[in-house]
Amino acid sequence: MGVSSGQTGKPKYTSLAKAGSSGHAEPPRRSSGRLVMHSMAMFGREFCYAVEAAYVTPVLLSVGLPKSLYSVVWLISPILGFMLQPIVGSASDHCRSRWGKRRPYILALGIMMLLGMALYLNGETVVSAVLPKPSKKLTVWAVSITMIGVVLFDFAADFIDGPIKAYLFDVCSYQDKEKGLHYHALFTGFGGALGYLLGAIDWGHLELGRLLGTEFQVMFFFSALVFTICLIIHLCSIPEAPLCDNQEDNTWQHNPHGPLLMQNGGSDYGSLERVKNGYMKAEQTEPATAKQGEVTENTENQTQIKMTMRSLLKAILSMPPHYRYLCVSHLIGWTAFLSNMLFFTDFMGQIVYHGDPYAPHNSTSFIIYERGVEVGCWGLCINSVFSSLYSYFQKVLLSYVGLKGLYIMGYLLFGLGTGFIGLFPNVYSTLVLCALFGVMSSTLYTVPFNLMAEYHHEDERQQATGMTPRGCRGRGIDCAALTCMVQLAQILVGVGLGVLVTSAGSVVVVVIVASAVALFGCCFVALFVRCVE
């Protein structure tokens, strides 16, 4: 390593880039309790997602949003996320906050989620209190505030997944990353199931609903309470060493005779940790040397800005092929999954129950359609429960089929299940096959990130032995590139499926398309996605 353990005399400046290329400090093992605490953010996030899925359409309809603006509401957030997520991921790779690299971003995005929920669940109430007289101006303001709330919530909720995954990768050992991702999937399913169950309760006829005003206020109360508690637990789960200052002292105590390696593995694969304070110093011994370190710091800070602003897109496009194929497979999987999930309740109401959403609201056809939508919500609850259960059984199956086998199996089962539902729509078989939606959900939340962790681990070993040079991307930007495939899938689904439904004249085409895309993704994973041996 950069400084021999037997060296005597005054310590010298050691470049972290050089030090990191010859060794890697593995983070300490984390207890199951700490990993569960870390997973609580996913529980709270999915709980809020379920509440949005249950209430956002009634809210938008109640404020009088024109049908022409529906696509605008659903497309703004993924477009912004797709453009900004890699930039924020790169910025978090060299955030110098004393609180760590990822947690400041997670806190900011969590506050944005709470603000978005407050706006879209309470926007009409707030506007009515300010403008008590009914008017066209009241409707415009209510629609505007609700739209802003939906967009803000979706943007922050989609965005927060990248920093959470990068936070896990930074502070956990290779073994704990896999365990932590399974806990993430487990609590994601639990959060979604609880959110759907609470959303299915008719709060308007209960005492709490009368106390708080409407069922929208009740759900905001539960959502804000659950998410705030989960976010606090998550942020206090595992200490995250800052990129500068305190980290110097801590790492020097652990390794007083060698180069200073970061406690959270910050000098690992592809990160710009060489910009951290220019060159690390053990103690200031000579003015000339200190001045040299100061000049180096300024130069490296300029390099950091240049990387963030000018070379970010190049860093993503120059990803090794196995990273790129993983992102493409993730895009295919989320396109199939979202195609089915976004239209599933409508499919249940129109195709399975033969209802009519455009019939008069007091007609039998509309009442039947509403019944189908309610049963569809229970199907989504089954999806969430089985997502949690399957995330547990994944650990057992992993030793038999491996990560790539789990990846292929998730896509294959989902493709076959949705295809059967589309060709033979039946209430009971559809609800049973909703369990396969949970298999796909758990697969998308765990397997791609497990593969990413394996790729990082492989790169770290190669860099430690000098087989490959250190790259210019960090874990943050890699996780962001993988996560922003979800936003790209939302854009594709939002733009394409409406045209398909209009052309086919039936929502059943959505389920068939989801099946075809999933089966194509299964073949893509089998041919192109690489699993580290």
Image: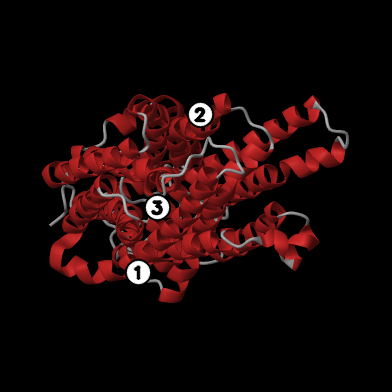
The residue carrying mark 1 is 389
User: Which residue lies at the image location 46% right of the left edge and 27% below the top edge?
Assistant: 309
Element type where label 1 sits in the image: helix
Element type where label 2 sits in the image: helix
The residue carrying mark 3 is 266
Kind of residue indicated by mark 1? Leu
Is residue 489 something one can see in this rendering?
A: yes
The residue carrying mark 2 is 71
Given this view, does label 2 or label 1 mark the residue nearer the observer? 2
Give the percent coordinates (x, y) of residue 529.
Answer: 17, 45
Q: Is residue 275 left or right of residue 268?
A: right
Kind of residue indicated by mark 3? Gly
Sequence-first tag of 1 and 3: 3
User: Which residue lies at the image location 41% right of the left edge and 31% below the top edge?
Assistant: 491
Rounded to the nearest angstrom, the CA distance separating label 2 from label 3 is 41 Å
Kind of residue indicated by mark 2? Ser
Considering the image in quadrants, where does the N terminus appear? bottom left
Q: Is residue 1 left or right of residue 228?
A: left
Between 168 and 500, the residue placed more toward the observer is 500
The relative height of residue 93 versus residue 44 in the rendered view (above or below) is above
Element type where label 3 sits in the image: loop
User: Which residue lies at the image location 26% right of the left edge and 38% below the top edge?
Assistant: 328
Sequence-first tag of 2 and 1: 2
Question: Is there CB contact under 8 Å for labels 2 and 1?
Answer: no
Sequence-first tag of 2 and 3: 2
Given this view, does label 2 or label 3 mark the residue nearer the observer? 2
Between 444 and 429, the residue placed more toward the observer is 429
Rounded to the nearest angstrom, the CA distance separating label 1 from label 3 is 33 Å
